[in-house]
Image (tube, rainbow, N blue to C red):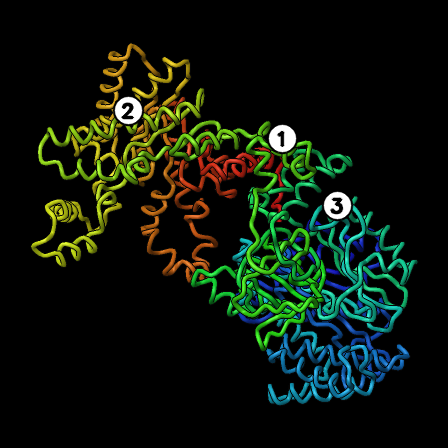
Amino acid sequence: MPKLVYDFTEGNKDMKDLLGGKGANLAEMTNLGLPVPPGFTITTDACRHYLQHGSLPDGLAAEVTEHLTGLEDKMGRRLGDHADPLLVSVRSGAKFSMPGMMETVLNIGLSDESVHGLAKQAGNERFAWDSYRRLIQMFGKTVLDIDGDLFEHAIDAAKHAKGTRSDLDLDAGDLQGLVETFKGIVKDSTGRDFPQDPREQMDLAIMAVFDSWNADRAILYRRQERIPADLGTAVNVVAMVFGNLGMDSGTGVAFTRDPGSGQQGVYGDYLQNAQGEDVVAGIRNTVPLQDLERIDAKSYGELMQIMQTLENHYKDLCDIEFTIERGKLWMLQTRVGKRTAAAAFRIATQLVDQGLIDTDEALTRVTGGQLAQLMFPRFDASSDVTKITTGVSASPGAAVGKAVFDSASAVEWAERGEHVILVRRETNPDDLHGMIAAQGILTSRGGKTSHAAVVARGMGKTCVCGADELEVDSVSRRFTSARGVTVAEGDVISIDGTSGTVYLGEVPVVASPVVEYFEGSLDPGSDELVAAVHRLMTHADGRRRLGVRANSDTGEDSARAVRFGAQGIGLCRTEHMFLGERRQLVERLILAEDEAARRSALDALEPLQRGDFVEIFKAMDGLPTTIRLLDPPLHEFLPDLTELSVKVALAGDGATEQDRKLLEAVRRLHEENPMLGLRGVRLGLVIPGLYEMQVRAIAHAAADRVRRGGDPRPEIMIPLVGAVQELEAARDETEKVLAQVAEETGTSVHTLIGTMIEVPRAALTAGQIAQAAEFFSFGTNDLTQMGWGFSRDDVEGSFFSRYIDLGVFGVSPFETLDADGIGRLVRIAVAEGRATRPDLKIGVCGEHGGDPDSVHFFHSAGLDYVSCSPFRVPVARLEAGRAAVMETTGGSDSR
C-alpha cells in the first residue's frame, strides 16, 4: 500500500504532484531550517481515492493517527486537551496554486471545555473566545455548508450592540456571547450540535478539503487557468500558531519583489492581532509591510533575511505567508508568486542579471499570454478626465465598463454584451464567476495580497483594491466617494490597475509601449519594460526552430506583420478581396448566362486582384507569400435567402429583374450544409475560369514587382483538397497559366504550388497528395470541424460549456489544438508527406498558429512554420522560442 501521509521532514519542493504545492514547500522550508510549525501532509493519492470511491482509503486513518501522535509529542500537547490543548489547522494545497478556491479550517481542537484551557495557558481570555468563534464560523461554512452570511450578520449585530465598527472592540464577554450565537446557528441549520470531539472535527475538515476540489468555484478556476481536473488536492495538518494573541502578534503576506511591477524592495501587508484569513479576505485594511519594522524590528529583520534566503533558493519571486506569535516569527507558506505580465518580464531579466538563472531559463518564466496582455492599450493620461479616487494598484491594465455590485449581475450583464466593472467592498472565492465576466475589479478594502488582487493578477484582469475613500453600498447598488461623487449601478467608470486610479466615465486609450516597440516607433532602451521584452524576444528568435508568418489579406496588414516580426505570409485569403463594392462583380459572375458574360465579369475582377497582390508583394518583398485561391461557397457573396425571398415577395410585380435573378441564383446555390458543399478546389474545377483568373492576377503582380526591382515569392495554395486527383487537376491548370503569363511578360517567377490539409482524408492520404504538392499548410479550423464533426458556428454557444464541465475537453478544440485526435492527423500527414517528398515545406495557417499551447505542439510535430494574425505574431515568436528551449532543457510548466 502506498504511503499516504508525510511529515514535513520527509518531503521537498520537487514532490508537488504528491504533496501539493503548499505541502512540498512547507517541507522544503523545514529542510532549510526555517521556523515552520510542525505538521504533516495527506497526499493527493488519498484525495483521488476519496473522490473516486466516496470513502477514505484503507489505512489512512491509522497513518493520520501515527503522525498526529508524533505532532503531539513534538509540541508537548494533545489535540483538544482540556487543560492545555494542541490546536491544528487543516489546509488545502494542490500542485498548482488556486488561491482561495478550496477550503481551510483553523483552530481545530477547541471545544466548550478546551477553550478555558487555552485561555488559561495564553493568559488571554479574549484570544481564546475569538479563536473559538473563528473555528465555529469557518467549520460551519466550510464543513457543514452553512450560509456564511448568517455568521457575518451575527458579528455585525454584536458590533452594533457594542456601538463599534471594529472587531477589535469586542471583548471576551462579547465573543463568548458570539460563540453561543454561532452554536445556535449550527444547531438550527444542521439539526446537530457543533462537534466537541477534536478528532471528529479534524476528520470532517479533511474530507471537506477533499470535497472542495470539486466545488463550483474550484472547477471554474481550473477551467480558467487550464489546470487538469484529475490532480486532486493534498491536505496539510499544521500545529496552530496565533497572530490574534494581542498587539504583539499578527499575520502578514510578503513578496520578495513587487508582483505588480517586478521592482525589488519590501512588498506586502501586515495586520496586528489577526489570523491569516483576515489579511487575504481584506476584511480589515492592512498596513504596509514596511511598518512592521516600527512595530516589531526583530521579527522584521528576521523576515527580511528569510525572504532573501527563499528567493535565492527558489531563484524566483516568492510569495510568503507568516504569523508572529508574541514576537516569535513563524513561516506558514511559500510559493513561487503569481505576478503580472509586466513583472514577469522584468523579473526574468533581473534574475539573469543577478546570475541566478540563464537566459534560456528566463524564457521559460514568461509566456505568450503575458506578452499579449502587455500589448493591450492603456489610458491616455493627458485626456480631460474626472478622477474619483485612488486605491492600490493590484493588477495592471486599463478597464472600462458599467459598475455592477454583485457577481450574478456581472455575469448577466456580460452575457448580454455589456462591459462591466465588478465593484465590491471585498471579494471572496464565491465571486470568481463575476470576476471572470467583468473587465476589471474594484474593491474598497484589501491590499495587494487580498483575494481580489491575487486572483486578478493570476487571470491578467485589471484590478484596483483598497480604495477606502469609497463607501460601497451593495444593497442600494451604488458607491460614494469622499469627494461627493456617487456612482450608481450602470454608470460607466474606468479603472487603471497600473496607477490605482478610478475615473468617472470612459477614458480614452492609447497604444501600449510594447506595441509601439514592435511597430518600430519606440526604442527598446527608452523603457525598462520594453527593454526586458526586447531581450527575451531577441533570445526567443535566436533559439526557435519554427518560422512565424502572418495571416494577412491587405498590403497594410502585411506591412504591420513584417514590423511585428513576421517572416512571410502563411495565409492570404483572396475571398476577402471580393467584399464591399467588389461584391457586385462577383454577383455578375454568378448571374452570367453565357461564356461572354462570365468572361466579362472575370476580366473586371482580375485587375483589382492584381492590384491587391502587388501591394502585398511589395510589403512582403523577399519573403514567402502563400495565397489561398477562393475557398468559401459562392452563396456567401449573395444576399441572404430568407431576406431576399421576403423582399421579392413584398415587392410582388414590382420586384426588379435583378432581384428576381439574384433570388433564382441564391436558390440554385443553396446547400443544406454549405461548408461541405461546393467550395474550395471544387469551385476551381467546376466553375470555368475562376481559379485561372486568380492565378493570372498573382502571376502578373509578381512579374510587375520583378520589373520594378522587387523580389516576390508567391506560393499558390489550393484549398479543401481531399484527393490527389483534385490537386493534380488544379495544379495542371495553375502551371499552364503561370507559363502563359511568363511568356506574355518575359518574366518567370518561381512559384510553389501546394495545398491546405483541412479534410481528414487529405491527412490520411498525405503521402499521395505530396506527389503533387510542394508544400502543406494545415487549415486546423476546418480540420477540427470535420475531425470532431462539429459545426463551429453552432456548437460553441450551445453545448461546449457543458462539455468542459463534464471534462470531455479542458478547453475548446477551436482555441487550442486537440493534440490527441486532430494532432494525430497532423503527425500522420507530416510523416507520410515527408516520406514522399523529403523537402516538403509544412506549416499551419489556422488561428491555432497563434495559440501558445498549440505552438508547442506544432514544434514537436516537426512543422516548419506557424501563421497567425499580425497582432499574434510576437506571441507565436516567443512561444516558438520557449518550445525550443523547453524541448532541450525539459523546462517545467510556468504556472
Q: Which residue is mark 2?
A: 697
Mark 1, mark 2: which one is toward the viewer?
Answer: 2
Foreground pick, 277 / 647: 647
The amino acid sitting under disc 3 is: Gln
Q: Residues within 10 Å of mark 1 (few under 14, many from 20)?
A: some
Does the residue at mark 3 contact the one at mark 1 (Cβ under 8 Å)?
no
Identify which residue is drawn at 16% across, 45% down: 669
Left or right, residue 267 beside residue 774: right
Foreground pick, 81 / 63: 81
The amino acid sitting under disc 2 is: Ala
* Residue lying farthest to the front in this orientation: 384
Identify which residue is drawn at 44% across, 54% down: 809
Foreground pick, 13 / 803: 803
Q: Residues within 10 Å of mark 3 (few under 14, many from 20)?
A: some
From the top left corner, tell me how far across and down residue 379 is, in percent: 60, 49
Q: Which residue is mark 3?
A: 263
Left or right, residue 196 beside residue 732: right
Q: Which label is found at residue 539?
A: 1
Q: Which label is found at residue 859?
A: none
N-terminal of the two: label 3 or label 1?
A: 3
The amino acid sitting under disc 1 is: His
In the displayed structure, would residue 505 be above or below residue 274? Answer: above
Does the residue at mark 3 contact the one at mark 2 (Cβ under 8 Å)?
no
